Amino acid sequence: MLRRYLIAGLLVWVPLGITFLVIKFLLDLMDRLLLLLPVEWRPETIFGFSIPGFGLVIAIAILLITGVVVANLLGRTILRLWESLLSQIPLVRTVYSSVKQILTSLLSTGSHSFRKVLLIEYPRKGIWTVCFQTGPAANEIQTHLEKESLTVFVPTTPNPTSGFIMMVAKEDTRELDMDIESALKLVMSLGIAANTDREEVDSEKPSP
């Protein structure tokens, strides 16, 4: 009985504590943006004390202002000139264009990248793993393949931000009726989340 109470307490406080630490880390990271402001413009100078999370407000304001500027014709013209300048710098143009393409694919509502969760047989036949479709195989790669292929990202567990890409024949993939958030939750929880969600669904069904 004592062990049961201890586990119940851990299930309440450990997720809460980790969530608090992650949010605090992100807020502290955003607050470092205040170091870019002149000393006389910082909250501790104006109000006499620091305001936790004020850096996040500044970051959101900068994003909104930037979005408003580049949404009009003049802003788009300036952005094209800026990107044209960056494209002349060898290393910078590679990093910038890659990051922008990734963000465009992830954030664009019309993009099919990271919109589908697939199953593929990996690392051998009979063993299946979850992956994300990032798009069709590159043209240069597709010309060397006999079947229509897809580019997929196979995440590692429990850190889904790392992984590797694979070119898989489209007919060898199975599309899942699962959203990206649920798939990431599955990967990060080592597969435990899937069983937990199923138990919650089963518990909500009326008993016969």
Image (spheres, helix red, strand yellow):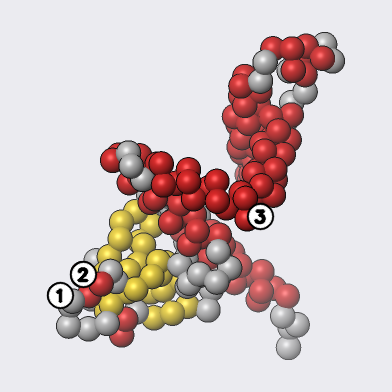
Q: Position of residue 166 (x, y in %)?
A: 27, 65
Packing grade of label 1 (10 A; few <14, some 14-19, many >=20) is few
Instruction: Please tell me whether residue 103 is drawn above or below residue 195 in the rendered image.
Output: above
Q: Residue at x 48, y 43 (%)?
A: 82
Q: Identify the residue position indicated by label 2 in the image.
A: 140
Q: Residue at x 66, y 20 (%)?
A: 37
Residue 118, by quadrant, is bottom left
Q: Position of residue 15 (x, y in %)?
A: 64, 44
Q: Are circles 1 and 2 on residues that touch, CB within 8 Å?
A: yes
Q: Identify the residue position indicated by label 1 in the image.
A: 144
> Mark 1 or mark 3, which is nearer the start of the sequence?
3
Q: Nearer the viewer, mark 3 or mark 1?
A: 3
**Amino acid, disc 2:** Glu
Q: Does dot 3 land on a helix, a strand or a loop?
A: loop
> Mark 3 or mark 2, which is nearer the start of the sequence?
3
Q: Decide which of 162, 103 is in the foreground and name it.
A: 103
Q: Position of residue 198 (x, y in %)?
A: 59, 72
Q: Decide which of 32, 99 is in the foreground and name it.
A: 99
Residue at the far right: name it: 47
Q: Identify the residue position indicated by label 3 in the image.
A: 72
Instruction: Please tell me whether residue 8 is drawn above or below residue 122 in the rendered image.
Output: above
Q: Residue at x 39, y 81 (%)?
A: 174
Which quadrant of the figure contains the C terminus? bottom right
- Mark 2–mark 3 Cα distance, whole angstroms, equals 36 Å
- Mark 1–mark 2 Cα distance, whole angstroms, equals 7 Å
Q: Residue at x 59, y 29 (%)?
A: 29
Instruction: Please tell me whether residue 34 is drawn above or below residue 111 in the rendered image.
Output: above
